[in-house]
Amino acid sequence: MKSKLIGYWVTTIIVALVLLSGGVADLLRPHDAAEGMVQLGYPLYFMSILGFWKVLGGIVLVAPRLPRLKEWAYAGAIFDFTGAAASHIACGDDVFHIITPVIFALIALASWVLRPEGRRLGMLWISRT
């Protein structure tokens, strides 16, 4: 049980740091990040939208309670990471740019699977027998 909790926190902190650092970079729009966004075919204002939601998602993942928001944050992380991989595939980028977000998506999935009971949304359907 302790190893599951350690696995949860390691994967969660990795995902939160990736979201937070990527979100701050998107909000600050450094030259390299802006060039990358343009190369992928996205308008620069998209960085503000992504950055805002990445920062919020990273905060929510490590915050106590908030199980419904955590579900949204995990979904957003998966959309972000898989969308990044798909964008790099569409642009014909090298394998590194494709594999990296896929690995982060798998880490986010591991965090979601390993989350403790207190960080789960709960039962969605209650059986009435």
Image (spheres, grey):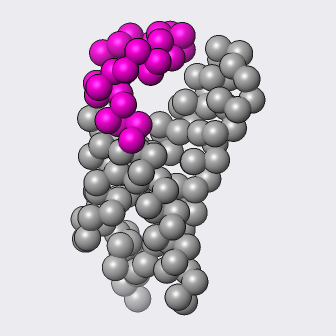
Q: Quadrant of the C terminus?
A: bottom left
Q: Quadrant of residue 125?
A: bottom left
Where 52 falls versus 14 (above or below)? Answer: above
What is the x, y in percent for residue 69? 28, 56
Question: Is residue 68 found inside the magenta-colored segment of the image?
Answer: no
Question: Is residue 30 found inside the magenta-colored segment of the image?
Answer: yes
Residue drawn at x 53%, y 39% is: 81
Front residue of this view, candidates 25 and 19: 25
Where 72 falls versus 10 (above or below)? Answer: above
Q: Which residues are magenta?
A: 21-50
Q: Quadrant of the N terminus?
A: bottom right
- Is there any visible trace of residue 122 in the rendered image? yes
Q: Is residue 121 left or right of residue 92?
A: left
Magenta segment, prevailing SS (helix, strand or loop): helix
Q: Is residue 85 left or right of residue 112?
A: right
Q: Is residue 12 left or right of residue 119?
A: right
What is the x, y in percent for residue 121? 34, 69
Residue drawn at x 61%, y 53% is: 106
- All told, the count of numbered labels is 0
Residue at the extreme front: 31
Front residue of this view, candidates 124 and 118: 118
